[in-house]
Structures are given as C-alpha cells and as structure tokens.
Image (cartoon, coloured by chain):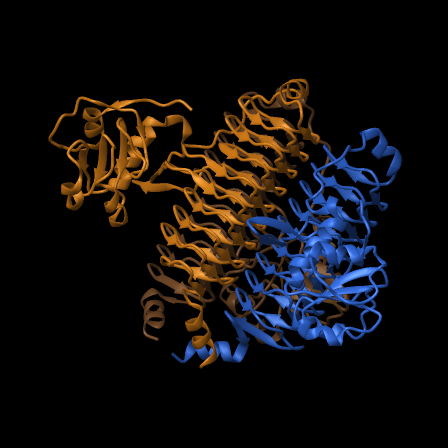
Chain colours: A blue, B orange, C brown
Amino acid sequence: MKKNKIKIFDILKILKLKNKGKKNFFINKISDISRAKAGDLTICKNSKYVNFLKSSKASAIIIEKKYAKLVPKKTFAIISKNPELDFLSIANILYKDVVLDFICSKKLSDKQIKKKYKKIFYGNNFNCEKNVKIGLNTKIGYNVTIKQDSVIGKNVNIGSNVLISNAIIEDNVNIGDGTIIGKKGFGFKFFKNEVLRVPHIGKVIIKKNSEIGSNCNIDRGSISDTIIGKYTFLDNQIQIAHNVKIGDYCMIASQVGISGSTKIGNKVQIGGQAGISGHLVIGNNVKIGGKSGVVKNIQDNKTVMGYPAVEFREFVKKNIIK
Amino acid sequence: MKKNKIKIFDILKILKLKNKGKKNFFINKISDISRAKAGDLTICKNSKYVNFLKSSKASAIIIEKKYAKLVPKKTFAIISKNPELDFLSIANILYKDVVLDFICSKKLSDKQIKKKYKKIFYGNNFNCEKNVKIGLNTKIGYNVTIKQDSVIGKNVNIGSNVLISNAIIEDNVNIGDGTIIGKKGFGFKFFKNEVLRVPHIGKVIIKKNSEIGSNCNIDRGSISDTIIGKYTFLDNQIQIAHNVKIGDYCMIASQVGISGSTKIGNKVQIGGQAGISGHLVIGNNVKIGGKSGVVKNIQDNKTVMGYPAVEFREFVKKNIIK
Amino acid sequence: MKKNKIKIFDILKILKLKNKGKKNFFINKISDISRAKAGDLTICKNSKYVNFLKSSKASAIIIEKKYAKLVPKKTFAIISKNPELDFLSIANILYKDVVLDFICSKKLSDKQIKKKYKKIFYGNNFNCEKNVKIGLNTKIGYNVTIKQDSVIGKNVNIGSNVLISNAIIEDNVNIGDGTIIGKKGFGFKFFKNEVLRVPHIGKVIIKKNSEIGSNCNIDRGSISDTIIGKYTFLDNQIQIAHNVKIGDYCMIASQVGISGSTKIGNKVQIGGQAGISGHLVIGNNVKIGGKSGVVKNIQDNKTVMGYPAVEFREFVKKNIIK
C-alpha cells in the first residue's frame, strides 16, 4: 500500500478553503476520530462523533462550523460545509492506490508453498500470494486464495473457494466454503456526475475460536477495522459491512446483514434475516428476533423483534391484539 | 445458440387452436412485446402489456380473447386461454438448445489467451472460452470464467471466482469476487406434472463506470435484456432477476432483491435487504428504506419504507403512534 | 466417517447421572427420534417430539423427567435436566471425527476420472474425490468439487464453482453456479465458555428433476437428512438449513431462508426473501407471500403473508384500513 503525505496548506488549497492557523505541517495518514494520533487527519462526520472531539489527538480534523469550537487547541480545524466530501477528496490523494481492491499478484508456486509452510494441509489450486503468514496445522480446502499481508493462525480450517485478503484470522477459527473476507466496503459519494470512493485501509480481524459459515461477506474496514470477537458463530450468507465490531460469544443466524460501523456487544443472539442499520450500538446479551429491522441502539439484556424492531412484549402485543 | 423457425400454421396445430387468417408465413424468433419486429412472435401476458399492442410490429401475438380486438391488423392474433403456457410451448420449440444454461465448452489455453489479449492482466486458472472480447487494461482475478459471446470493455476490474456469460460489460466497470452474471432466470411453468422452462435469450448489459459487489447474482434476460445503468453501485449479495432494468447513478445496498422485469429509474437509492416485486416501475430519485417490501409502482422523487412499503411519513406515523 | 460405540453405563458416568435399569448394553449410533432403531441413542428435545415416544424403537433416550413416563419399556430413559446438552456431549464422543466439516482429501487425477466415469462431460479444474458415483450424461462446469461418498445421478447438470459433499443428487437435477451442498449446519451450544458442536451425520438428498439456483446453500442433516423433493425449483441465494424437508413441485423464489428441521409439503410456493422459522410444518399447496416471516405451522391450501405471516385477507385488511 503506497501512501503519500500532504501539508495542511495544500489540503486547504485543494478544498478551496480559507482557515486561519499554522498550516505548514504534514499530514501522514487518515484515521478514525477515536484512534487518531499526531500526524493524522480525521473527520467529524456528524453529531454522533462530537463526543470524541475532546480526547482526539489528530493533527487536523475536517468538521462543520457548528462543532468547530469543540476542537482541541492542538488540532487544526478545517471548517467545511461538506466534511465527508472534503475528507474523501483528501483521502483519495493520500491513498491513490487503495481506492479499488487489489486484483491479484503473482502466486507462490507449489514448491514455494511447501518450503515456506511446513505443517499445513491444502487442497488443489491454492493461490497463496507473498507476505502471507499461516500457522501450524491449518487446513485449507480447494481453490482457496489468500492475498498479500494476511495472517492466518494455527489450527484454522478454511473451506473451499474461500477468498481472504487484508485479514488477521486467529487460532482455531473455522471458515466455510465460498466466504469472502477482506474486500473493500460499500463507500463512495457521487460528486458532479463522477464518483469519489472511500479508500479502505482497515483490516478484518477474526478472533480465536470463532466460526464463519459459507457464502458470507465480511468487508475490511475503511479507516478502522472490522472485528469479529472470539467464540462468535456466523451462519451462511451473512453480510458484515466495513468497520462493524462484533463481540464475543455471539450467535448470528443465516442471511443477517449488519451495516457499516455498527458495534455489537458480547453474547448477542441475532435471528435469521435480521438487518441492523449502520452506526448503531447494540448492548451485551441482546436477543434480536429473526427478520427484525433494527434502526436504533439497543441497551444490554433487551430482547427485540419487528420492523422496526421494538421490545419483544410490544411486538407480541401489536401482533396479537388487532 | 441454435434457433429453429416455424410457420403460424404449425404453431396453431401444436397448440390445438383454430384461428382465422393467413397462416402460411414463418416465425423466426420470439420477442418482447415492446421490441418485437416483423417475423417475431410475441405475447400479451396480462393487462399491464395491453398499452404496447397498438405500436407492436410483431408478426404474431399470443393473447387472450378479451384483448384480441386491440391487436393491429398486420399482426396475427393467436387467441389462447393460457397465453403464457402456449407461448412457452412454442418458445421451447424455437429455442430447444437454450432452455438450460450452457455448462461449458473448451477453454483457451494460456498461450492462446496471451496471443489474443495483449494488454490484459489475469490471475491463475482463467477459464476463457472462445468468442470472448476483452478490452485493454482489464484486470482479472483468480479462478475467473468468461463464457462464449461475452464482451468485456476496457479498464474493467473483475475480482476472483467470478462467472460471466451472455453479458456485455462496458468500460471501467468493477465486479466483486464470487459474483455470477448472465445465468438464466427463474422462469418455468408446471404443466401436467412436467415442467416447461422459459428459454433465456437475453443478455446482461452493465454500463460504463458501474460497480457490482461480491457474491451477487445478475440473471440474463428471457426475451429482453437485464440492464444496469452507468455509475450505478451494487453492494454484496444482491439478486437481480431476469429482464430487470436499473437506471444510472443508483445506489443499491447489500442483500437487496429485485424481481423479474421491474424497471428502476435514475438516481434511485435502495437500502439493505429491501425487496421489490416483479413487473413494477420505480421512478427517478426514489429512496427506498432498508428492508422495505415494495409491491406497487413508485412515482418520481418519493421516499418509501415498510412492508408493504408506504410513504416515509406514513411509515413513521404508523410506527410511533401506537 | 469413524464412529465409536459406548455403553449406557459409561454414558451415565460421563453425564454424572444416576438412573436405574440394565446399563450393560452398547449404543452404536445416534438417531432422530422418529427413525431410531435398536442400538440407537435418541433425544426428546421438547414437547413437539413427545408424540414420537410411543413408537420409538431406540435403545435409549435422553429426556426430561416430566416426559419420562411416556418412554416405552424397551427404551432406556436417561433422565436429564438439559437433554440437548447431554445428548451433544455423548454425540461428540460417538462422532469425534465429524464435528467439523471434512476439509479435503486427495483428488482423482484427470486420467483416473476419465477411466472411472465414461460418459460424463466436465470443465477445467474438476476436484473429484474418491468414492464418488456419477451417472451417465452428467455435465459438470468449471472448478467443481465433489467430495467423498457423494452420489450424482444421470443427466445431472452442475454449474461452475459448485461444491457438493455428503449428498445424493438424483437424475435430471440442475444445480446453478456457486451453490454449496452438504456442509454441516449451524448447530452448537455454548457450555462453560467453551462450545459443543452438533455432529452432522445426515445427507442432502435432492430428488429427480429438481432445480437449484446459483449461490444457494443446502446444509446436510444433523441426525436426519435434508431433503428436496422432485420437480422442486429453487431460485438463487437461498438458504436451506439442516434437516429441512421440502416436498415435490414446490417453487421457492430468491433469497428465501428456511430454518432447521422445518417440513414443507408439496406444491408449496414461497415468494422472494420470505423466511420460515425452525421446527415448523407447512402443509400442501400453501402460498407464502414474498418477504413473509412465518413463525407457526400452516395448514394445507392456505395463503399467508406478512411478518409475522397471517392469512392473506388479514394482511390486506391490516395494511389498507389504517
């Protein structure tokens, strides 16, 4: 992944913005508001992210005027009427080469694979690119592709026709057939009849002892990571969008979809075909009924169902008393 | 694709129908009522298609008695009690060889590929059949299959494990991993404990600068084409049925399903897991909320949500005032 | 599939249970309550299975105390406070090697395939394991994998990127691209911060003349089989969970999900994106509207729609009279 760097001075010039302050320092990378460090450019997307401003260590932030006074003194506030669009423009300059998925590079030969990975087992047509780590006793099915910079742990079982890129798969994880892990997420803006894509630089992290079903999609994060906790079980045909974080000991049934940046607690159970909107927080021990459409945050220990999802008692009442 | 031709006289004999008129001319192919030309046999499926009768140039049409007087004089009206079944019977004779998907033919050797396509890049195990066109600078991942008669434009990015057949993919299109384009759609009728399949002779056309996610299905048209407009973005795990037409600059989120022959305007946004029934018309600039079930036409500029989908204000009212 | 055997005496010891009776005989295998024979251990999961007790021929059953008096005299009743967990523990000992999917074994060489199967046609990269039967005139696409112990009938069409294991596919069946048949289902219990998986020893049986779309998942049964009846048509992106039985002449549209152990009659029509809960019985000639969420049994000849699904008239009334 090639990455450029850029001065605040030039950022303002590109965005045609006029801001006061010291503009002569470099931005090295973009980052999530909650994780930004010195040298980073971040964004305050909307009111949901205002709480993070105080503790942010970013060197610069693109933000609407109304929130500007909340920006800490050491952070340069780039006042914008359209923060998302302006952030995207700069991100596209910093990360020119990761705006689209990397299609493929040269795979290792069978001989190279056998030399490099001594105690793994794999089926026919294993496309293993360079800079991939694979732990002991890992088993890999037919037609599997693992792309550059992925790390696979020990005792991992990977089914056939699986595609893994930009991922860290921890020990004892099982991955079903046809599952696709680590592609870029669905992020872009139309702008003057052209399109501006969100660069995806995050990883997918799947923690120990988890299990992913068949024909699932788990997209890589944009500026943070997509994370599946330990001992979490996903059934088939599930869609996990960019930046989603799922806790430990969760059970997620078939055909569920979780939209971007949503955070799910521990021991959460989600019934088949349920959908969860983006940027939500779902507490611990929550149960979500099959086919529910969750459109707001859910507190710990609640059971919800329906579209839009409501507390289970209410759903039953609504649907029995006509 | 082999194709037979058949006389009106014989069509009537096969269908055991008695119709007056000149029966001694040939039908060469079947066609959509709106696109039919001289030599074509078409069908008036139901009342939704009656408006097309006046301007139809078909040589013959299979139609219910109640609409027969609307058929133009130059078109031979085949009066049927079950137009769909009768049309299918004839279509199965005209297109004996395209009732099922073509499984595979001989692929080009690596040497042949390198000779034929000079500026493309492709990964291991590329199954490229004959009569395929691929434009300059196109990149193709691992385990990709492109079948006979497909045309791929310039600067197209095709992910791994992708299957393309019966398709025209224009320039600058991106296609995600595991996506299947150009299979026959879900069309058949049970008849006397046997099954009669709809022949699929249409293409999939994906216009310039569009992007298709991973693990999607876009079925080829039956007698018309399935079309995705330019700058239209599809997320993962989306199902686009036969004959669907989607406009330009649309955004369609993950796990959406669009049923057969539905037409979607420009700049339409569809939330995740929404479903749209078949044979509908969705206007321009329409917004459809996540998980909505759309069962009727939607006019330009409307925002709808719910199952069945209603105007957004109504959905909110219904779900807040209990 | 290796299988151990175990004495009742040892089962009780492992489960730390004290039961009276003759404990000195062997259990050879586990089985479904309705199909259990002498030598089998079965389970009475809940009240839905009590009706099967009378006619059960199992040698032993794990059951709650409240149902124990209904157990026939020749069956040893293992009284448990948590039958499912206890049954799982024993099943994991009996079937140590089938708790996870089998990743892959050595495939036949092209020469071996050509010698063994004389009148089949197949594309590049066919991974065919040992002990596979394939009938005459069967056509197989690119990158297809068929694993040990599968039986494929005559005149079967198998698309590209298909994975088949633990399955019996009868004559004239068509299977679309990217479909995965015969993986283990989504069955496990969390227990003391570890996980106990349900062993899957059942098959997938697809009967004559049926058709499965693309990117579908049909999981193998746990202790019974997953069955698709004859002349039944499935569209794309459908999920059929373990132990589901579907009758003959059914039509199931795209993106439908059917949960574990549900039984569906003959000539049932299911609209796109509908979901059916587990352990239900759906009668013959039932019509289920698109996107419905079915949570209870449905009698013969009913038409239902909605979430939760209700009779169609009621759905219309509910949604028109506001």
Classify residue A241 by image quadrant: bottom right
Q: Position of residue A135 (x, y in %)?
A: 85, 46
Q: Residue furthest left?
A: B20
Q: Is residue C33 left or right of residue C103?
A: left
Q: Is residue C50 left or right of residue B31?
A: right
Residue under the image location 41 percent in, 34 percent down: B202
Give residue B166's position: percent from left, percent from top: 49, 32
Position of residue B122 measured from the top left corner of the image (x, y, whole percent) = 68, 30
In the image, residue B25 sits, relative to residue C47, either above or below, namely above
Q: Taking A23 as reference, is C140 above or below it?
A: above
Quarter the C terminus of chain C occupies: bottom left
Q: Tell me which residue sits at (56%, 59%) in the image.
A: C33
Lateral position of residue C92 relative to residue A314, left or right = right
B94 or A31: nearer the eye?
Answer: A31
Quarter the N terminus of chain C occupies: top right
Image spot of residue C191 (x, y percent): 73, 67
Foreground residue among A227 and A33: A33
Closest to the observer, B254 or C53: B254
Say whether residue C22 is visible: no
Along the line of sight, the residue nearer the viewer: B254 or B234: B234
Q: How many marks?
A: 0
Q: Is residue C105 visible?
A: yes
Task: Please identify the quarter of the rendering in which residue B30 is found.
Answer: top left
